Image (tube, rainbow, N blue to C red):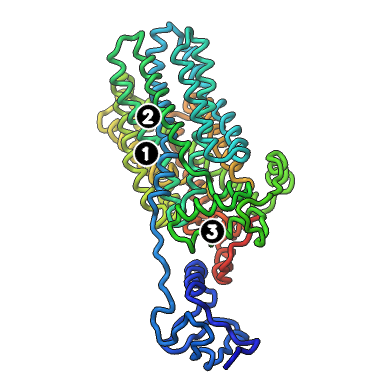
Amino acid sequence: MEHMEDDDVVLLSDTRVREENLQYLEAPDQPRVVNENTNYQIQDAPDELMHVSEDACNNPEVDGNIQPNSTEDLHPPVELRLTNYALKCAVVASITSGLLGVYVKVMSGGAVHIKQDRKTTEISMGALTGILNLFVILGSAMAGWTADLKGRRRTIVFGGAILFFATLFMRFAPSYAFFLIGNLFANIGVGYALMISPLYIAEVSPTFSRGCLTSFPEIFINCGIILGYIFNYVFSKLHLSIGWHVILSVGTTSLAILTIRVLHMPESPRWLIMEGRLLDAKHVLAKTYGSNEEAALRFTSIKEAAGIPPECNGDIVNVNRHSIWEVIWRDLLLHRTRSMCHILVCVIMIHFFHEAFAIDAVFLIFKTADITSSSDKLLMTLAVDLVKTISIPVATLLLDRVGRRPLLLFSTGGMIFSLTFLGTFLTIIDQRDTKLTWEVNMCIVSVLLHAFFFSVGLGPVTSVYSSEIFPLSIRAQGCAIGVIANQVVSIIISMTFFPLYQAITLGGTAFLLAAIAISAFLFVYKFMPETKGRTLEEMGLFFGEFTNWRSAAREIEMQGTATRPRQQ
């Protein structure tokens, strides 16, 4: 038989078979080519593709690469594993967050020495800490703009440089006023770090390990806080006039080393493709995935999401990118699609719940209720931070196994219990003239339980979820919006907490937070789709139906789409 008829199916070469098998893993409902000993058949294919000539199947001259009787024609799919390259990128980017944790805790400890050394008042120290959130908001907004304009890696470097020079300025500040100016700029760097680390890791990480790696910044922040305790304790033994200078010097040195190290990190492959640097993006994807076939699939889908035509395959191509302000105005404000509205609601609400149940907010209740001595406050704070640091790795290991939604539901459900528990015993204490030891101990247990439930779900999942659901063109701005929402809620809580608990008591405040936890549980269950195992480019397919997202997900699964449509 010299040739096949028009309606016959051309047999696939070894390379093509491997590619089709990999696609089948991601879209199992698609037609799949299988080896049936001596004949090749196409199963679950449309009728017009079912007419395969037996002569063609048995004729080795049709394709010299195919041996009909060989069992090795169909290569098993390559098992994808986390590469050291992707792990190193996530660790280096997360060190920024670790230094952020050290900075926050060191500043809280150094504030005591600064207050005594500079003879500042309580009002001045309140101003020093109260302006943090406002300038974090400014830093996050600037980071979103910088990440799109200059790239994700340079944004990490830029944020580290801001923190470095601001800390150096505070180290040699001749007065409290100069120290305050340095702290303003340092808080801008804090905003950069909070926004850019999860975004960079989400875009560099392979799909099958994205949840685990993107939660690294949360682990490093809490490890940095523990190191901050150690630094504060060690440097508190020094003379007052040099103690806080040494603390700031350690931070300056660490930031300098980190900034230099980040220069050797790769750029995000998705940002490279948006800039038309296709060859560089291919190299980064191949290293992070460890599989040329998988890297090729991701490269194709990212190109489509970036709006680059398939025929553009040069090393560098010209890309007509809209200005950042045009993208914000068009996609976020003026012409929002249902998918974008759903994504914005999910991001803003998960950040609202994150900050409403943050350990600081609940811990304020407990400190106000009973603890008065500085040593007891330090021990309790250290215990809470240790529970958080131990619990977050549990979520890290489970994010890519059980998914984001189960962890969020478990977390919010547990916080309903712990907050109700806390509110009950705070109310009992409030009704007594004297506080019993067992009642105080129950409050301690409830706060530690809350720290555990928060840290195995809502704590790390918030940054993971918000960094992976936005479309490519608006992802940096979307992550900045999430951090801004988080800080706005933090400001509101810090301003309203004391008037609130004076009006409804501490127990009533805990019960109010428990009611908010119930609403968080229902919101996650009804509105938030699962993102485990989904590529960043296909996230938009699962948003837009709000409470009916399950039906949309089932329909997509039934269609078994092998390609990754462009997000709108």
Helix, strand or loop at label 2? It is helix
Location of the C terminus (image quadrant): bottom right
- Lower position in the chain sequence, tag 3 or tag 1: 3
Q: Where is residue 479 in the image (x, y as percent from the top left)?
A: 56, 41
Rounded to the nearest whole Å, what is the CA distance between mark 1 and mark 2? 13 Å
Amino acid tagged 1: Ala
Q: Which of marks 2 and 3 is in front?
A: 3
Which mark identifies residue 298? 3
Which mark identifies residue 185? none
Q: In this view, does 260 lie to the left or right of 377?
A: right
Please say if the residues under marks 3 and 1 sit with CB atoms less than 8 Å apart.
no
Task: State the residue in front, 429 or 254.
Answer: 254
Q: From this viewpoint, which residue is outermost toward the top?
A: 119
Which mark identifies residue 366? 2
Examine the rendering and report whether any part of residue 125 can be seen: yes
Q: Is residue 127 above or below residue 482?
A: above
Helix, strand or loop at label 3? It is helix
Please say if the residues under marks 1 and 2 sit with CB atoms less than 8 Å apart.
no
Task: State the residue in front, 560 or 520.
Answer: 560
Give the residue drawn at x 58%, y 71%.
559
- Lower position in the chain sequence, tag 2 or tag 3: 3
- The residue beneath circle 1 is 451
Q: In this view, does 398 lie above or below 326?
A: below
Location of the N terminus (image quadrant): bottom right
Q: Classify 10 Å Cα crowding around label 2: few (below 14), some (14-19), many (20 and above).
A: many
Q: In this view, does 565 lie to the left or right of 293?
A: right
Rounded to the nearest whole Å, what is the CA distance between mark 2 and mark 3? 49 Å
Q: In this view, does 524 lie to the left or right of 336?
A: left
Give the residue drawn at x 31%, y 35%.
386
- Lower position in the chain sequence, tag 1 or tag 2: 2
